[in-house]
Amino acid sequence: MNGDPVDQPGLFVEGSTRVGDFEVQVRLEVPSGRTLALLGPNGAGKSTVLRTVAGLQPLEAGRVDVGGRVVDEPAAGRFVPARERGVGMVFQDHLLFGNLTVLENVAFGLRSSGMRAAPARRRATELLVDAGLADRSADRPSALSGGQRQRVALVRALATGPSVVLMDEPLASLDAGARTELRRALRHDLAPVAAARVLVTHDVVDAFALADDVVVLEAGRVVQSGSLSEVAATPRSRYVADLLGVNLLSGEASAGVVELAGGGQLVTVAGMDGPVFVLVSPGSVALHRSAPEGSPRNAVPGTVTDLTLVGERMRVHVAGAPSLVAEITPVSAAAMVLRPGDPVWAVVKATEVTTYPR
């Protein structure tokens, strides 16, 4: 992601800002009509990036373009106020007006942009019909479900035709069933929208369901960016690996053997030398209660530290050199009578060890 902003008007951000002693340096670009998922652990600076785009947090250096217009450039003395940027924002806690009806909440955004009351109500009604929420127009937000309130907040954000839409953890407060329903609804609501969209989330499922591209932010720095398939295929940090549920190690490769930074080694069929990342799918890790027979290329003795049921699979954490996470069926875990503290052997075929440059 180097060079000038993308040709399509949308969002371009390159620069730095500071909150207290914490500095965020970021570069991202989102063409119109695409959704970028901004991922990262708590405290990574994700919300600070959104505030910078929205005009609630100024840059110290760099530039923000919204819809092809420079809205923040300290070197040029330019800073466009939030209300004039053409940015719509959806917050985790909705921020709907509790004393207004659903229709009045949506119309409020239109009236704030200068539209008169009667046209604003007519346009708000049309938007609610499109979103399938017309039957809730007269209700107060307190009468809606969490997912419905979030959709009303999105309709209000989209009502003024913004160039950029920012969504800060819009599904975080919902239970699993409501999240699934809202993901489907958001795909419907966002599909015809020409704006560039940025979605902050901790959930990789949200990213895969709603986003076209990903930027991963850790400790105020971009550590990885690209398409979802690129990031999933070659994670470059422990956070991304944990998010995707894979084993990520690093080390020095030579003649088909990787000496791992945390101790131990793994044999691979890849002919790569030098600093590498090592990726092992948990489903490729077989567990044995005793030393396996034959001559497996990678057999690591270790100790079970944790067992976690994820969907229909049991994830077994094994501390060793290296430490690995295996994924087996609950039936297999029960048959092996696995408990934390039990000794096991983790076996990985050399063909299942993926390496790529570090």
Image (tube, grey):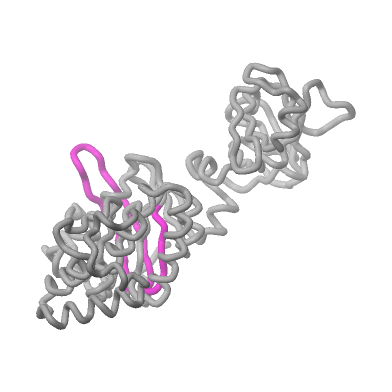
Q: Return the x and y of residue 112 as percentages of the image width and height.
A: 12, 70
Query: What residue is shown at x 69% (from left), y 34% (from top)?
Result: 330
Q: Is residue 36 left or right of residue 351?
A: left
Above or below, 109 against 200 in this view is below
Which residue is most to the right?
A: 294
Residue at figure coordinates x 68%, y 18% from the top left: 342
Nearest the eye: 157 or 241: 157
| Residue 159 counted in the magenta span | no
Q: For the C terminus, which image quadrant?
A: top right
Q: Quadrant of the N terminus?
A: bottom left
Q: Position of residue 115 (x, y in %)?
A: 12, 79
Q: Does 42 sit above or below residue 132? A: above
| Depicted 138 relative to depicted 45: above or below | below
Residue in the picture at 38% in, 53% down: 171
Q: Is residue 184 left or right of residue 73?
A: right
Q: Is residue 171 left or right of residue 116?
A: right
Along the line of sight, the residue nearer the viewer: 186 or 22: 186
Residue 269 or residue 52, whichever sits in front:
52
Write down the region rendered in magenta.
Answer: 10-38
Residue 87 screen position, x and y as percent: 23, 67
Q: Position of residue 136 (x, y in %)?
A: 29, 67
